[in-house]
Image (cartoon, rainbow, N blue to C red):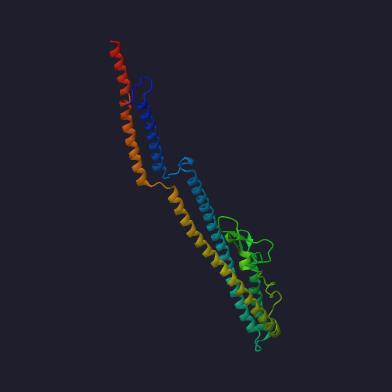
Amino acid sequence: MGGISLTTNMSSLNTQRLLAKANEEVGKSFNRIASGDKIAGPEDGNVILIQSENLSADVAAMKQGARNLKKGESLLKMAEGALNELSAILLRSRGLASQAANGTLGETERRAINIEYQTVKNEIDRIVGATEYNGTYLLNGTLSKGAEKHIVLQAGRDSSAPNQINLNELSNLTDVSTTNLGLKDSELTSQASAFLALNDLTKAIDTVLGIRARVGTTQLKTIHAKDAIDTQIEELTAAVSTIRDTDLAEELTNFTKQQLLVQSGSAMMGQGNISQQAAISLLEEVIV
């Protein structure tokens, strides 16, 4: 049986300690409920905090990677649109060359056909010189494998090869000007020149179709890569939520519990002085 102490009230000290702890827990629960975040700092678990911060950093990097891929897809769409127009021009040009190669045509008719041919041929170079995305010209060889500077899409959380897409290596979009397609000096002023133009146009069409196939494949790759990143972002976000987000039902239960402890602790503070009062009463009896 414990004795009665006049100088040290252990019951009161113990009650004060528990009351202070309960008050602290009430404050923590209040902050968790208000912020929706159950990790306020290292005091809530240093390892968990580091893990959640690393995952959050990965999510931020991958969200930017998804935006990068979307921009790359937009660039490739612009290139494909211009290439589609070039294909239409080349097909029209081959039709003109076939018409000019017909032996029943007179010189006047052939000259008229050549005027149209030169006009649509010049349009090829105009499109090549005008197709650009954010300052990058797309049809002049900038996107070819042999270009001095390659356009690389950063698509993941770090700079490793699996997290990057090299548009030059995949699309190899070479210069499609009339010079590079072998059409610079092409003309339809005679039947012989029309025959030559037909052969050159057939090669040019095949070249452009090959480029379009590579560009289309690259575009599909960026779309699939973005879809994959979006899925990873969703899963990582769910993981961060599991670690950091407050379980409202659990926290409200804890908040109520700690409030009850504060109330009961406050009530017991007065009771903790009973032993001291007993000691004083005993002294008064002895003195009397």
Q: Is residue 138 visible?
A: no
In screen coordinates, is 159 left or right of 3? right
**Residue 265 location (% of width, % of height):** 33, 31
Q: Residue at x 65, y 74 (%)?
A: 121
- For the point 57% across and 65% down, the residue is 76
Q: Does residue 177 lie above or below 200 as drawn?
A: above
**Figure check: 200 above or below 38:** below
Quarter of the view holding residue 160:
bottom right
Q: Seen from this angle, which residue lies furthest front?
A: 1
**Rendered location of residue 68, percent (x, y):** 56, 58
Comparing 97 with 10, the one in front is 10
How many dots with numbers? 0
* Image coordinates for residue 30, horizontal then vertical, percent: 39, 39
Question: In the figure, 257 relative to 195: above or below?
Answer: above
Tell me: 286 left or right of 197.
left
Asked if residue 86 can be seen in this view, the reply is yes
